[in-house]
Image (cartoon, rainbow, N blue to C red):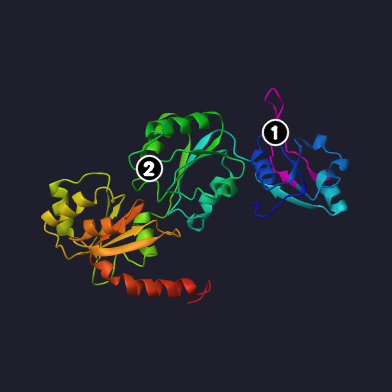
Amino acid sequence: MELTLDCAGLTVLIAGTTTAARHTVRRYTAGGATVRRIATPAQFHPRLLDAVSLAVVVEDPVTAHDDGAPLGEQNWEPLRAACRERRILTASEEPAATGGRVTLIGGGPGVEDLLTVRAKQALREADVVLYDRLGPYRTLPQLAPGAELIDVGKTPGHHPVSQAEIEKLMVAKAREGKQVVRLKGGDPFVFGRGGEEVNTCLAEGIPVTTVPGISSSIAVPAAAGIPVTYRGVAHAFTVISGHQPLTSAEFEALAKLGGTIVVLMGIGTLPQLTSGLRKAGLASSVPVAIVEKGYSPEQRTTVTTLGEAVTAAGLARCTSPAVVVIGEVVRQHRDFSATLERVLAQPLGAS
């Protein structure tokens, strides 16, 4: 059950073992409810329902004695029958997973409504969330109610928590038996170092899964009305990292390939990038768009050319995070933006 209502002033009875019900308890507590707890059917008494507005049964089919011998299926029917008699709403939830594990989540361009359904489900079940500024961190208290939230974010030139320390922290928290979510912007495997984190977990024997996210290489240009491909203009696009210096051979290959070049994290190295492409033969007149803070209220697009990009970025005081788009598709951005706005204005299901 996804808790989306304000539960302040409500009393909720949650039935289920401590381990199985831990996420349910956290969600209702975070929602402002007064929570009553029972772990086994033997603890139930009808008086526990006094002033209760909702009873939630966490379906944990098998529990165990202290010596590990199975007890078998729990019978919560007396609780449910008493709730029916008193006309108290009841709900059932799946138990929290046992054993520590890590889930890498791509947070997309940083807004909650572009998270996938699977990502939101993983966040609801998280005991710990390691996040950075490029993911949708502002609403984490609602997305992961009651979870421990740890900021491991990096900014250009400032890495208070190193990548090695992040990976150690993920493993340590998972070994405590916790469900650990590593939330990052974009997609974990597109310059997100998700591959390194997966390998670390596997090497340490920690189960790990990945939830893809919408890559900012596509999403942020789209937010500005710029298609990375366009029929008759660009039939391919290349994504590069502005953090990684390119060789002369790589610049030449990019210049000859054609299509669209999308640069992530490229503001700091924009002079080297534009100079390298021009030396490799890309015309100074090729259009360039710098899209800052995509999908945020501060989103801004600066349109210029390859020869004037550094000057334009300086005059506009462009800052990270930003996506740089280089190619003829930038000329389409105004028409495409109008089309995008019309599409978004249509009701869901409209053609």
According to the picture, the residue beneath numbered tag 2 turns out to be 155
- Judge the density around disc 2: few (<14), some (14-19), many (≥20) Cα neighbours within 10 Å: few
Q: Is residue 214 left or right of residue 252?
A: right
Tell which tag, 2 or 1, sits nearer the viewer.
Answer: 2
Q: Is residue 170 left or right of residue 158?
A: right
Q: Position of residue 157 (x, y in %)?
A: 33, 39
Q: Position of residue 134 (x, y in %)?
A: 42, 48
Q: Residue at x 41, y 31 (%)?
A: 165
Q: CA distance from mark 2 to mark 1?
A: 46 Å
Q: Position of residue 219 (x, y in %)?
A: 38, 59
Q: Does the magenta-highlighted stretch encompass residue 67? A: yes
Q: Does the magenta-highlighted stretch encompass residue 65? A: yes
The amino acid at mark 1 is Thr
The amino acid at mark 2 is Thr
Q: Give the magenta-colored segment's residue range.
A: 56-78
Q: Position of residue 235 (x, y in %)?
A: 25, 65
Which secondary structure lies at badge 1? strand
Q: Residue at x 34, y 63 (%)?
A: 301
Q: Is residue 185 above or below residue 340?
A: above
Q: Specify the quadrant of the image occupied by residue 210.
A: top left
Q: Is residue 123 left or right of residue 304?
A: right
Which secondary structure lies at badge 2? loop
Q: Which mark is residue 63?
A: 1
Lower position in the chain sequence, tag 2 or tag 1: 1
